[in-house]
Image (tube, rainbow, N blue to C red):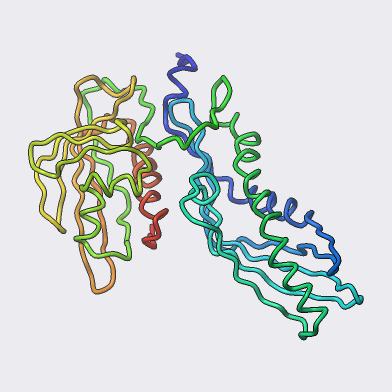
Amino acid sequence: MVMPASTANWHWKNKNVTSWAKEWFQRELTAIVIEGTEGNIAISSVRIEEGDVELGQRKSKLITIYDIQMKLDWQGTTSDGTDVTGKLSIPEVSHEITLDKLSDYVYNWTLDTTSSPAVNALFAFVKTRLPPALEAKFAEFPVALIDTHGRDLTVSGEPSRTGTPAPSIDAVAATAASASTTAPKPAPSTFMAASDDLFGLFTDERRIPLWTRAPAQSAAQADTEYSLFGGGVKGKYVSLTPGKEIVQTWALQSPTWPSEHFAVLTTTFEQSSDSTKVRFTLDGVPKGMEDEITRNLEGYYIHGLKSIGLGTVL
């Protein structure tokens, strides 16, 4: 049976496009050439050594998910004909900076050529003129990402680029109404944070939006209701042990999730000297959905925490 587009596009889908992104930045940034009275400059190479780029789709909206570290080599010629080279490191190029404007880009400059008045003038020219050119390209990137790969995730219709869509946990299940259930257990994840701090990030409604990028409701008390991802996930807290464990009922607000069906999510925290290991167990997932739910937990819970700089290791 083929699902209608309105239903098929509701589900959570992800596509890793890091390799494509590396090629895109190499092609687009090395095309930048700037000329002025101080001389001319260009980018000779681009390297992305850390980070990932993904495109997600949820409720017919395409979501750009990326956080990369970029290193560039630049070159130029001064007004007196001296060849100049240098390097530029940009610690973070991300959705949060480019689209959400949560912080500014950071540029770390290196000059490889021996200093002289003409060389210094060109170096100052590079630091003034190159960032605006780079940021114009960074602004083009999410549009190019959606235009190139959006059709791979969207069954039909035009992708939405408005606002910052909030990711929600979801999965397609042909057997969603089946009485058979399973308990997916994603691989434990280690975060560079104290267990009490992580517990707060999972339960404090003022802090949850830091990693979900969506409104949340949470009183963090047993037998009270909670809502995550703008209402995409709802349930009740069963028990909470600060810094140790959270047990909560868990249901998707989705056309394919069985009506009135709740799974039980148990999140445990194991703190060591400098980090905390987090384990998720979701009991009561309809049989056949295990792999996708595991990918979703890893993609949005774990990646969400990674996006705020907690140094996640999957």
- Above or below for 271 versus 120: above
Q: Can you say which quadrant of the picture contains the N terminus? A: top left
- 78 and 210: which one is in front? 78
Q: Residue at x 33, y 36 (%)?
A: 229
Foreground residue among 308 and 287 = 308
Q: Position of residue 120 (x, y in %)?
A: 76, 78
Residue 178: x %, y % from top left: 25, 22
| Residue 24 located left or right of residue 77 | left
Instruction: Say which quarter of the image contains residue 39.
Output: bottom right
Which residue does the image show at 33% across and 32% down from the upper left? 289
Q: Find residue 150 and report its image quarter.
A: top right
Which quadrant would residue 292 be assigned to in this image?
Answer: top left
Please indicate whether residue 155 sits to the left or right of residue 246 in the image: right
Residue 210, x across and y down, in percent: 34, 49
Tell me if residue 136 comes above or below residue 110 in the rendering. Answer: above
Quarter placement of the C terminus = bottom left
Please state the total of marks drawn on the protein image: 0
Q: Nearer the viewer, residue 11 or 70?
A: 70
Residue at position x 22%, y 27% in the image: 180
Farthest residue, direction right: 81
Left or right placement of residue 199 versus residue 223 in this view:
right
Q: Nearer the viewer, residue 7 or 207?
A: 207
Residue drawn where x is 10% and y is 43% of the image: 221
Place of residue 265 in the rendered image (x, y in percent of width and height, measured from the top left): 20, 41
